[in-house]
Each structure stands twice: as structure tokens, then as C-alpha cells.
Image (spheres, helix red, strand yellow):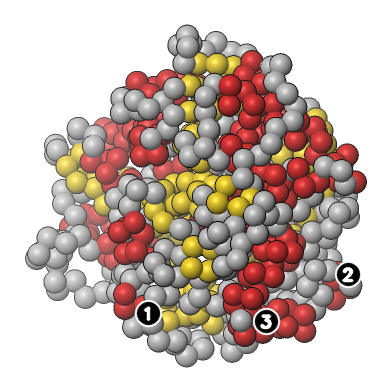
Amino acid sequence: MSTEIQIESVLTENRVFPAFPELVKDATISGMDAYQALCDEADADPDAFWARLARENLVWNKPFTQVLDASEAPFYHWYPDGELNVSANCLDRHLGTPTADKNAIIFESDDGKVSRLTYKELHARVCEFANGLTALGHGMGERAIIYMPMSVEAVIAMQACARLGIIHSVVFGGFSSKSLHERAVDVGATLVITADAQVRAGKHIPLKSAVDEALAMGGCEALRHVVVYRRTGGDVAWQEGRDLWMHEVSAGQAQTHTAAPVNAEHPLFILYTSGSTGKPKGVQHASAGFLLWALMTVKWTFDAKDSDVFWCTADVGWVTGHTYVTYGPLAAGLTQIIFEGVPTYPDAGRFWDMIERHKVTVFYTAPTAIRSLTKAAETTPAVHPREYDLSSLRILGSVGEPINPEAWVWYYKQVGGERCPVLDTWWQTETGAHMITPLPGVTPMKPGSCTLPLPGIDAAVVDEMGEDVARGTGGFLVIKRPWPGMIRTIWGDPERFKKSYFPPELKGYYLAGDGAQRDSDGYFWIMGRIDDVLNISGHRLGTMEIESALVSHEMVAEAAVVGRADATTGEAVVAFVVLNQSLPEGEEAIRIATELRNWVAKEIGPIAKPKEIRFGENLPKTRSGKIMRRLLRVVASGEAVTQDVSTLENPAILDQLSQAR
Ligand code: WTA
């Protein structure tokens, strides 16, 4: 835990936007009283509360008799003797109901082609693929890497894995072959499901070749098959026996399949995310608890209605795409949009155009997208949301990073027409689903605050000893009681799990890794990470990961990476680099900086590319050799260093780094 944290008041914009009570006349949570009653029910008897939700909302093959087993805390086990199947809870449960013939997915490709799939059809395709995988000998407990574009096929792949008890680990298509390799080795993958290429903004970006590269790096001896979804039909290298087309795996297979019941705690997926040290952590989620929390939050936060057209713009490579594309909306029987492309192609009106054409009612996106579309709308009036009919919208959501009050107000006014609540949802890969968020029509909103915890979530702000801090005082955001959707462990590294999330001095509370404070209304204001994790366009990246990538380049002797505020991406990566040669200048400095940026893209992925690289002869260090990142953050922000630098070994280096560009 960093003690460097400096929390200043963020309560600059304390304007209250009233809830829209008319929105919730028939909502799942129909008002403040109903919200309070649920919170009270959970607080009075958490086990009874979570048992009731699990019985009422999930379909069980074998009912559980125990709710929470805390005997191995912080390794909590939820519903430990129950059995179910997650995919059956997303698909089979709707067969024989009116939902079966309803559209599950409306898919829009990069070039605007639209296809639709009912629940019945989606179920049939998932069954075919699950049968095909079974015929290949894949099944229970194996790990599959999924490296795919946003597509119906990605959802089919994930659902088919869940049906068979195969634990999936989705790797975002923007990650490099090196990152893919690291994850495939860590999970011991027997199966990779990928595509020939992905299509974004008219460009074809190969995926299969990255898989080939990753597998050629060695260490994946358990791997038996690479299944390839043919998206573009472009040329791909082929290894007979190992490589198979997805449509051929499914061809001729039965369209029915009995989903394998698994123990409630059977791992559903492993999703890698950045931590403060070392390599990314494989966050492991369990079947029943994850699905329950995904479903409850779709119902509560998004007030799921049968008539909704739900659109979460997140990629399935991130947790938001797991919870609010592949699992939550399907379990709730919603019609959802899946979009292959990017918000700025063919122009920055694409999102608004799609909302109009598909009559989207609930729209969930990231602040970075909102900020970049605001900018575009200001310069190109034709792509301003007012040029589109957005009257179908009833709820707007924001996810993944802090939403600044300006972006919030723009979203509220220009997109929502001052008719729709903006839900600033705070959560993490580790929490499984929303934790702190306004409820539509219920919670009065303050731009920049994620407001109040969901029922059952005992969130608090505490000091280093786990004591609650006073309102208006900053501290560590913790969750005091376990909840079903929580991370179970870090794949293969239970010690790191305990150390990262349950430090002993915090009384067994879950440590989120964010700083926060509460205002006089009890509203939560998130103030960013307390560790060395950056949030670039809503993507989590560890400074250490980028530093290791940089120092693995032969020219680099030392590197330190910090974040600086960025008007569009929230934070931007700034790297301070010491080379194994004299300080480069002019053209040479530009050339080396470009080479290093591309190197990072190759090592991790383009999202990790430093926005700025500054060269110096050294880094600011204490006499004991510790790099003073606090000072580098100030230098990166372009501000003058006013802090005490007397403990620095080499104070003059600050001037050099401040001037360097
Ligand atoms: C940040 C994404 C402020 C936070 C779902 C958290 C937020 C990290 C918000 C998790 C929000 C997420 N306001 N900050 N509403 N939502 N964050 O694991 O720092 O990719 O710890 O999960 O994003 O990122 P992750």
C-alpha cells in the first residue's frame, strides 16, 4: 500500500441532479425506500439475503444448502454444495418461454451490416459448437484462451466453454502475441479460439498470426487445438491437425446439448488485469456467484425490462464485456447490440446513428469515448448527438474510469436530453460487477460521484489501520463483507491474492486499490488508484509492466513510468528513460522514442504505448537508490517541482527531465 497518497478534496462540483421518479414506476428497485429496505435486509442477515437472491434468480441443478463458507477466508466459497451451469442460466432457461423467439443479439459489423439472432438460434449455435469441442476431446476443467474480435462468435465461444466447464481466459484482441503467450502459458491452455483477423475502421488486423507467433514462443505444450473463426477469409498459416475452422468444428453437430452441471465454485473464467507489481494477475471468478452478481446488477442498475434494447460498448476482452455482454444481459433475457467497430468510423456519429437505428434504450460506455465524441461534435456539427433521434434512450451508464463533471453533464444533456439518468458505475475486474452506482430514477446524482453502494455491498473508506475515516476525509476504499461476485483467487498465486486484496492490517476487508472519500450525504467519490496502476482510456495498465517492456530493449538502461492527466484518455503514459548511450538530441531522440514506443506496442499492445518519452542521464533517486516517482509525476504534469528534494541524490536531474521532450 502506498503511503504517498495525497488526497485533496474533489468535491468541486457538488451540484445535485434529481432522480427521475417517473422512470421507476415499475422498476426492480422502485424508490429510495425500496433501496433502503434491501440494504437493511442484507445488513440484518447477509446469508439469508444472498440465499434468497440466488434461489430466486438462478436455475440450480442441485440446490445449495450452505450460503457462505468462510472457513478459509479470504478464500470465500459461495453456495459451496450447489450445482448449476452458467450457460444454461443464460440460454436454456429461456427456451419454452416467449424470450426464446426474441432477439438475443443484434450484431452490427464494422461496415454496417446487421444480423440478428434469437435466443433459440443462439442456443442452437452454442450447442453445436459445444458438441464440436466435445468431439475434439475438450471438456471439464481445461483452460481455453479466447482471442477474438467483437462478434457473435466470441459470445458463442465463451458460452460453449461455460456449458462444458472449460475455464476461459479472454485476451483482448489489442494485446500483442507476447502478452497472449504469457497468458496462454500461465493458464496452461489446451485450446485457443481465435479469428483469422479483426476488422476495425475498415482495416483488417490479423489475429491468427499473433496466435501462431505466441505458440511458437514455446511453453504451451498442453495445447491441442487452435479453432479459427473465419471473419475476413484472408490468408492464414495453417498447422494441420492443430488448426481447425470454427464452422467446421460446429458443422453437422446436434443443435441440442445438455449443459454440464458444475459446482457453484467451479471457475468460470480467468481474466488478466494489471496490478502494481510484476506481471498481470489472473483474476479467477466462480460460476454461481459471478453470474448472480452480473444478473442482479443488470436488473437493479439497468432496471432491465423485457422491451429494452441494451447496448454495452465494451469489448469482451475486458471484464465489462464479460459481465455486461456475454453473461448478464443474456441471463436477464435482454436484446443487446454487439458492435464490431469503433465509435469514430465511418464518422464520430456512429454511436448516435446506431442508437437511432436500433432504438437503443440502455446505453453503457466509457468516459474516454464520451470525451472524444464531445470533441468531435464540437468541431463537426454533423456528428453532434442533437442531429440524431435519441428519444429511445432511457438510461445512460458510464464505466471504467472516473467521469469528469464536464463529460458527465455533456452526456446527460446532449445524449440523454436531460431525460435519462447517468449512472456512474464503480467496480473492477475483481468485483465481478457493479458495486457503487446510482439506481435509475432512485438516486439523486452528483456529476463525478458514483453515489451509493448496491444492497449487500458494505463499502467504506478507511485509514491504514482499517478504521473508518470521517466524512470528507480521504482514505482507502474497502468492502467490509464478502459478496458472491468477488474474485476467488489469483490463478496459480494464492499468496499474491491475499497480499494484494486482504492486507492483515485492514481487518480482513477487501482492499480495492482506489482512494476515495465520502461527502456529507454519504456519497462516494473515487479519487484514483493508490498503487502504480494507470487507467488509460479505461484500460488498466501497470507502470511496472511498461517499465519491464522498456528495459527489455537493448538500448535502455533504466526506465520509470508515470501517468499524467489527459483530456481525452483520462490518463496518459509518460516514460522517463535512461539509455545505454549518451543523451540523444533532435532527430535522433525522436527516432529512438518512436522505436521504443513501437517496442512497447509489440511487447504489451498498442494501448500501452507511452504518449511521451523523456530521456535523461539519470532518474531522480533517493540516496538509497529508490526512484522518486512522486517527483516524476510532477515533472510529467509540466508543473514546477515545489516539493522538498533534499533527500535526492541528484537534484539537478529534475531540471534536465523537466526540459527534455
Ligand atoms: C477505475 C473496470 C472512477 C478504478 C470495470 C478501478 C473507476 C479500476 C470507475 C478498475 C468509476 C472503474 N469511477 N474510477 N466509475 N470504474 N474505475 O478492473 O480505478 O478494468 O479500480 O474494471 O478502474 O478497472 P477494471
Please, what secondary structure does the residue beneath circle 1 have? loop
Lower sequence index among marks 3 and 1:
3
Measured as percent of width and height from the top left, residue 120 is found at 81, 36
- Which mark is drawn over residue 26? 2
Q: Which residue is pictured at 88% across the width and 69% down the height?
A: 26
Q: Which residue is mark 1?
A: 507
Measured as percent of width and height from the top left, residue 588 is found at 26, 32
Lower sequence index among marks 3 and 2:
2
Q: Which residue is pictured at 67% across the width and 84% down the height?
A: 40
User: Mark 1 CB in 8 Å range of ligand 1?
Assistant: no
- Which mark is drawn over residue 41? 3
Q: Nearer the viewer, residue 444 or 294?
A: 294
Please, what secondary structure does the residue beneath circle 3 have? helix
- Which mark is drawn over residue 355? none
Q: Quadrant of residue 354?
A: top right
Q: Quadrant of residue 59?
A: bottom right
Viewer-nearest of discs 3 and 1? 3
Q: Which residue is pictured at 14% across the width and 38% down the height?
A: 580
